[in-house]
Image (tube, coloured by chain):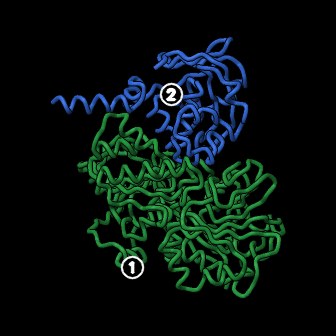
Amino acid sequence: MHAIEKLLAKKAGKQSVNTGEIVNCYIDMAGINDLYLQTIRSFFEMGAKKVYDPSKVIMFLDHYAPASTIQQAQNQKEFREFCWDQGIDLLMDIDQGVCHQVLADKGLAYPGEIVVITDSHTTTHGAFGAFGTGVGATDLAIILVTGKLWFRVPEIVKINFEGVPPKGVYAKDMILHAIGELGADFAVYKAVEFSGSALKHLSISERMAMCNMSTEMGAKTSYIQPDEITMEFLEKKVTKEYEIFHTDEDFKYEEEVTFDITNLKPQIAAPFSVDNVFDVSEFIGQEIDQAYLGSCTGGRADDIAIAAKILKDKKVAPRTRFVIVPASKGVFLEAMENGDVQTLVTAGATFVTPGCAACLGTHQGMLTSGERCITTTNRNFPGRMGEVSAKIFLGSPAAVAAAALEGKIVDPTDYTN
Amino acid sequence: MEKRISGKVFLFGKNVDTDQIYPGRFVEYTDVEDIKKYAMHGADEKFIEKVNNGDIIIAGTNFGCGSSREHAAITLKAAGVGVVLAESFARIFYRNAINLGLPAIICPGISSLVKDNENLTVDLEKGIVSNENGKIASIEPFSEYVLNILEHGGIKELIKKQLKKENNE
């Protein structure tokens, strides 16, 4: 069996599971975010009164942090009251940041865990050897009621990245390249394991970006086998006991794909789909109205540090705005401590409080018609960050920061060392 | 659940994402009457004026990719869409649709077999899709698990029933 199958079997109270089988698993951590008041509505509509196990529920007020409209304020009020009434102590209010980063910061993402959040990017937690998957509001409400959720045991595909990442190339470039080659529906319903020699060169932050983006190829979940890089992170953060599962040597993957990244160039996903991927050279000189660095994909302290290095003692281009949204409070504090916030604000960047902000086109950095934005986020669909004709280019933190500096898309290789 | 759905086709391409089905800036709405107004708004702002009860959405692969927002399924159901036939679905959309009692059916090649705006009948029991000239495609039967949810009109009713049963025992 694969490590993911062993994990699902354990949580379903079974010795083994088979691909395609429906299993009912106990959920270690169920997260709700503030987009989906429907979760609470569905909970009561099903006739439930008490949450099955409040200690395994976490509420994130992250997508509308802080509220920009009366409706958002009302929704958040109802979420808080639900937590207080139900004894849910893990209420992550508007100061905390994006759900996935908050889980990592607080040591609540760990190997062998099943984490289900009302957020499609829950695949992020594969970076810790957890089984993370996103669901809708009513599915999450079922966990609130029963403590369990059904899953179809997925086919598992393996994507290997081999080689040493060249200068100016990050995990974001690697995963965009893979999505471009394989397509936005390559892994629909499937689990994706990332492996290969290149992973030894990726920090936890980079691995989170990679696993996070696996949802953009349709993946149900992603997985990186915990290694010394994982352990170093876990030892600092996680106090809970956990179990690391290992894949049997004779396990047969449904498919295995290998990318040699030795000569990979920085990548850009052009409008209007995430699999519309090219070498950055195709877009050099493309003028940019807004550069955006943030989100659960590309808003970590390492990403902000890359931007600070590029913009140190320099200025954001006069006709370009540079919006930076730290993914969490922990990220924001670290970036302040490093002096990166000072550097970037001096250079002309605009900081937004930790949260999802304009990544999903709700507030704090929206685009109007005809505007072009380069961003470290995860989606470039029509209307994703505002008006439907606005063009969104996805790239690495270095590609975004270098574009902010020049006011146009450039090859970030020339700006990194 | 309606076993036989007849209506007008709204034909879409592949990778229709949740921002096209229900743009992010409207996700704060919680009342179904508000949510209904923005069905397919990111792809066709006039969709809600044109759609009638029982109409059918046909799409290519990966329909509903992107966000986990249940609004995408809520808005289509509330707008009156009777069934969505696509060559494949993004998994969260699929779960959301079934949970709400909106039939979402995988039908390989369907988007090249139908014309936008034509009248179509989907017979869920017989597993047949037909237009005015007769049968054009077959659909796979739902799995037992999915059928059970759809026959209860959605998973909420099913769980409600289970809870009642447990409380009585």
Instruction: Give the side of residue A311 with respect to residue B97, left or right.
Output: right
Q: Residue at x 59, y 20 (%)?
A: B54
Residue at the spot of label 2? B103
Work out which quarter of the rendered image holds the C terminus of chain A and state it: bottom right
Query: In the figure, residue A106 lies in which quadrant?
Result: bottom left
In which chain is the residue bearing label 1?
A: A
Q: Residue at x 45, y 46 (%)?
A: A135
The hue in which chain B appears in the rendered picture of the protein: blue
Residue at the spot of label 1? A232
* Residue type, mark 1 in image: Glu
Query: Few, some or many C-alpha atoms within 10 Å of disc 2 (few <14, some 14-19, many ≥20)?
Result: many
Image location of residue A401, percent across then percent down:
70, 74
Taking A337 as reference, is A83 above or below it? Answer: above
Tell which chain the image draws in green: A
Q: Nearer the viewer, residue B159 or A172?
A: B159
- CB contact under 8 Å: marks 2 and 1: no
Taking A169 as reference, is A49 above or below it? Answer: above
**Discs 2 and 1 lie in a common subunit:** no
Q: Nearer the viewer, residue B153 or A251?
A: B153
Instruction: Give the side of residue B34 with respect to residue B133, left or right.
Output: left
Asked if residue A259 can be seen in this view, the reply is no
Q: Residue furthest left?
A: B169
Q: Secondary structure at mark 1?
A: helix
Mark 2–mark 1 Cα distance, whole angstroms, equals 47 Å
Q: Nearer the viewer, residue B45 or B99?
A: B45
